[in-house]
Image (cartoon, helix red, strand yellow):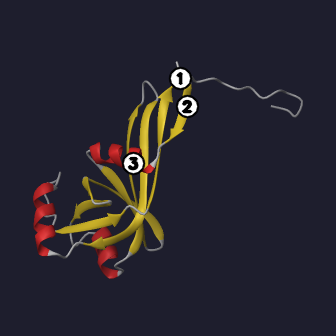
Amino acid sequence: MGPSEPAITVRTGHSVVELDREQALTLLARAPFGRVVYTRDALPAIRPVNHLLEDGRVIVRARLASQFSTAVQRRAGIVVAYEADDIDLDRRTGWSVVVTGIARPVTDTTRLARYQQLLQPWIDAPMDGVIEIEATIVSGIRLVDDL
């Protein structure tokens, strides 16, 4: 398109609506899984995991020998992001939520046993660690059909 040509706006019939913290966490709590984003060798790394929400924290299980667990164990208090979404590709509607906060290993034996019971692994591998992520920054959007 040249400088004298008018811009063409394509109307999709969809809008993006920002979610408040409570709305975003409610949707996240219903999602069966999400993606944890952390730093590995100074580069972003992403892993899918299942989760639960409790007291303003995202709780995930992981193998203690995994790169994610190792990163958290080595540098307790690292900043990570957690993302989950539910998008209908045909209708182009849905939502996406991102939680950013400090990740720490859960070491309290009572909490550890409880979370290990509540969060069943999806794969046939030992998931012997539990990590909690503080929901310090919570953002979310909903894609809605205007029609």
22 relative to 13, above or below: below
Residue type pointed to by label 2: Ser
Please give the label number shown on residue 22.
3
SS class, disc 2? strand
Disc 2, disc 1: CB below 8 Å?
Answer: yes
Q: Residue placed farthest to the right in the image?
A: 4
Foreground mark, 3 or 1, reads 3
Q: Which image quarter is the N terminus in?
A: top right
First along the sequence among labels 3 and 1: 3
85 or 64: nearer the eye?
Answer: 85
Task: Tell me the distance, in whole angstroms, between the alpha carbons under discs 3 and 1.
Answer: 23 Å
Task: Tell me the distance, in whole angstroms, between the alpha carbons under discs 2 and 1.
Answer: 7 Å
First along the sequence among labels 2 and 1: 2
Judge from the rendering whether residue 73 lies leftward or rightward of residue 82; answer left or right. Answer: left
37 relative to 108, above or below: above
Residue type pointed to by label 3: Glu
Judge from the rendering whether residue 99 lies leftward or rightward of residue 72; answer left or right. Answer: right
SS class, disc 3? helix
What residue does disc 1 label? Answer: 146
Please give the label number shown on residue 15.
2
Q: Residues within 10 Å of mark 1 (few under 14, many from 20)?
A: few
